[in-house]
Image (cartoon, rainbow, N blue to C red):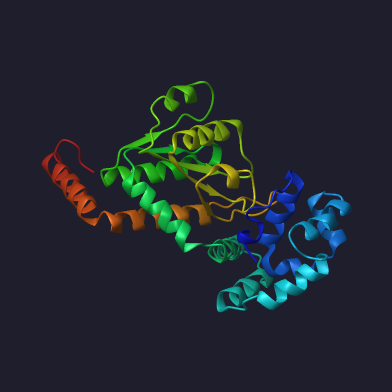
Amino acid sequence: MNQKLFEDQHLTPNEKTIADAITKMGMEVLTYTEDELAKSLQISNATVSRFWRKIGFKNFKDYKNTYKEKMDISPANKLGNMMEQVTSSTIHAQMMSMSVKHLEITLAQYRAEDFHHAVQSIVKAKTIYIYSPGPSEGLGNLLNYRLSRFGFNIKVLPKSGHEIYETLLHFSTDDVIVMFGFVKLHPESRVLLEHAKKLGMKSIVITDSIVSDFNMLADILLFASRGELWEFHSMIAPTFMIESIIIAVGKETAEQSMKKLEMLDAIRKEYKDLLPR
């Protein structure tokens, strides 16, 4: 089961929360009763009961039976299950287990066509705008740093406020916006995505929500697990996604990228006595 199940469905905010939760749970959803699921999400039992019929199932039992039939018990899933059961008194072991889990969840939701579309949009863009508010600022800086080395024209957008309006003036059809959208769609994100859509400008959102308002506004969604709302939010999977994009873009523009990196090396050698590394 993945996000394709919920595409073209007119879900309410509570239904989107349910859809996002059960998709992230994977096999774990089989251990829940409907009452437990409703309680964990703080959503009424009636809303949860109606949800199954809305997405094409008779009830929760029907959904779980269908899930069991389609479930793929892969080596990756087995490893993930084993790691979740490991207990350790050392924090590095616990963090390793959590990181593996987030990477496995991310790979389970990976859609090659979306990733390829995102890479091609970046490669073809006249200007790449990056919006990385809050805890995603470091991810935006990493993307900016690496792609700038390849010779791309990068603009980092302001985090909030009326400064955002000034940047909208420069958006064009030939550009792309790469946005980090974690937890929920903020007003600034909505303004940027709506304006990009109006211009026919490509938008890419890297998000930890499989089903959310981002689905309606963004052209391309790339999922990266960070944990549930009540868990410590890890940046392992989003960093993995960014580094994968960087490598893929580098391969697509190998000649240009290598030329720029060779120029950088030559400049460093020329001024190494004045600005030693």
- Name the image quarter holding residue 91: bottom right
Nearest the viewer among 23 and 62 is 62
Nearest the viewer among 95 and 28 is 28
The answer, for residue 243, to whether it is visible in the render is no
Residue at horizontal 40 percent and vertical 31 percent from the top:
171
Question: Looking at the image, is 266 positioned above or below residue 24?
Answer: above
- Name the image quarter holding residue 12: top right
Q: Position of residue 143 (x, y in %)?
A: 39, 45
Q: Position of residue 220 (x, y in %)?
A: 49, 50
Residue at horizontal 73 percent and vertical 73 percent from the top:
66
Q: Is residue 71 left or right of residue 118?
A: right
Q: Position of residue 184 (x, y in %)?
A: 64, 41
Residue at horizontal 84 percent and vertical 51 percent from the top:
47
Q: Position of residue 101 (x, y in %)?
A: 60, 64
Residue at horizontal 76 percent and vertical 68 percent from the top:
63
Residue at the limit of the structure toward the left, as seen here: 270
Quadrant in which the N terminus appears: bottom right
So how many labels did they put on this image? 0
Question: Looking at the image, is 133 positioned above or below residue 28?
Answer: above
Question: Looking at the image, is 189 positioned above or below residue 139?
Answer: above
Q: Is residue 223 left or right of residue 259?
A: right
Quadrant in which the C terminus appears: top left
The answer, for residue 47, to whether it is visible in the render is yes
